[in-house]
Image (spheres, rainbow, N blue to C red):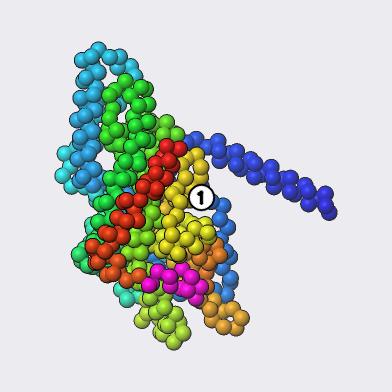
Amino acid sequence: MLKEGMNIMILLLVFLAITQFSNADEPFDVRKHLATVTRYADSKDISANSFVSSEIPDQCTPIHLNLVARHGTRAPTKKKIRELDALDAHLEVLVRDAKEHKQSLEKIPAWLAGWRSPWKGKVTGGELIAEGEDELYHLGIRVRERFPDLFNEEYHPDVYSIKTTQVPRASASAVAFAMGLFNERGKLGPGRHRAFAVTSESRASDIILRFHDCCQSYKAFRKSQEPNVDKLKEPLLNEITRELVRQYGLNFTNQDVSSLWFLCKQEASLLNITNQACSLFSPSEVSLLEWADDLELFILKGYGDTLNYQMGVPLLEDVVQSMEQAIKAKEEGYAPGIYEKARMRFAHAETLLPFSCLIGLFLEESEFELIQREESLELPPKPPKNRNWRGSIVAPFAGNNMLILYSCQLDNSSKYFVQVLHNERPIALPGCNGSSFCPFKVFKEKIVAPHLKHDYNMLCDVIEQKQKDSASSHADDPGRLRLLGQILHG
């Protein structure tokens, strides 16, 4: 018996070793390292941690779904199109200068010598593109297939609530998702589509989905920190710029390299081109540039400052309120068709990221305890060290969090649990002992309640006070800046 156990253990160790070797031996795919410009399918392919999700008991039935989703893959914004136009013009100058100085052109990649921005001449930008429509459409189909009991009723806007911001790419994403969700549920055209309602609040007052846009103190904080983040990235850009100048013989500037990295992300994500701008960078340089993007995301939109996510409390309250209403409907035996079964929201990375932080995703339990005490977290470690905080995972195009409320008949009494899915996969909740299936009472008391002491208006409208707090705790904190600098220098 002991010998059999030893043999099983040896086989298991061999299997794990083979698995680790095969993962390490996988060819480098830049499309999985594009930070928040990563396509949804590529994000889902990225090997996350080996989290084993909690089994959902057979006695449990889903009674409500909350969805918070980012828009799908989009075109570059007008500001970024102008940046690519400037890159286009400067690359032409660099190549011409090299010819005039009779430098060897053998080092210069053929594509670069005649490159023109694919978005040159466009006067609009930021719209949802066909690939983004496809991401949301098929997400809608999969959600219905996964939770058939939640979507088995005749459509009514009070039963299936669809909310979005007033930004066109977000509202278009909501439409694409709902077309998939209600596919073949109507009588319109050969596809048997049906009409559905999509509602939104004014940009000026939407504190549930565009709280970042309405929060004046956050705008002030971000404006004060952006120059510091740029300074932190500078040594990394200096190093990569020197290497590209040496390798290709062109007088690149840091701005050129920054724009080439942006071009790489756009080409790989939107056009599936990886042999042009992306080929200028080695895998290790791509990993460092991705990490620098993730660092900026962490500092300005994530766990880097409590204001980044505390301003999202109205969204958290809305999610919890919808669950409490579902529980009331269950307890009081409401008839089908007169109570909400799903509340689906479509917004932006600036919405999804703070919400993920509020519920403690991508943290170890010790880190979760720190944010509960409103203490600072360590920054994401520099490659080759592993990190939980990766933009390609936490907020890719069409990235989403789903919170499924279950009613469970356990111990002869009805109990309620919450399952959290990130990008459709169960994810650990550090505030619930690392489980992905959390008693609703524990979810409210340990994860939600500590945030509810923060009032949105107090956080965001008392501008002078918040600026003073921000300045004292961040902008003038030389120790913090030294620490950031040390991390960047490796």
Left or right: where 94 falls relative to 440: left
Residue, far top: 102
Residue under the point 47% across and 45% down: 381
Q: Main secondary structure of the magenta part?
A: helix
Q: Which residue was labeled with disc 1?
A: 48
326 falls in the magenta region: no
Residue under the point 43% across and 60% down: 375
- Which of the image's four quarters has the C terminus? top left
Q: Is residue 8 above or below residue 157?
A: above
Amino acid type at image mark 1: Ala
Residue 398 in view: no
Coordinates of residue 30 in the picture (x, y in percent): 42, 38
Left or right: where 206 falls relative to 444: left
Report the magenta residues as a range: 440-453
Residue under the point 39% across and 65% down: 67
- In the image shown, does 11 or 232 lie closer to the viewer? 232
Q: Based on the displayed image, in which of its 4 quarters is residue 164 positioned?
A: bottom left
Q: Is residue 360 above or below residue 17?
A: below
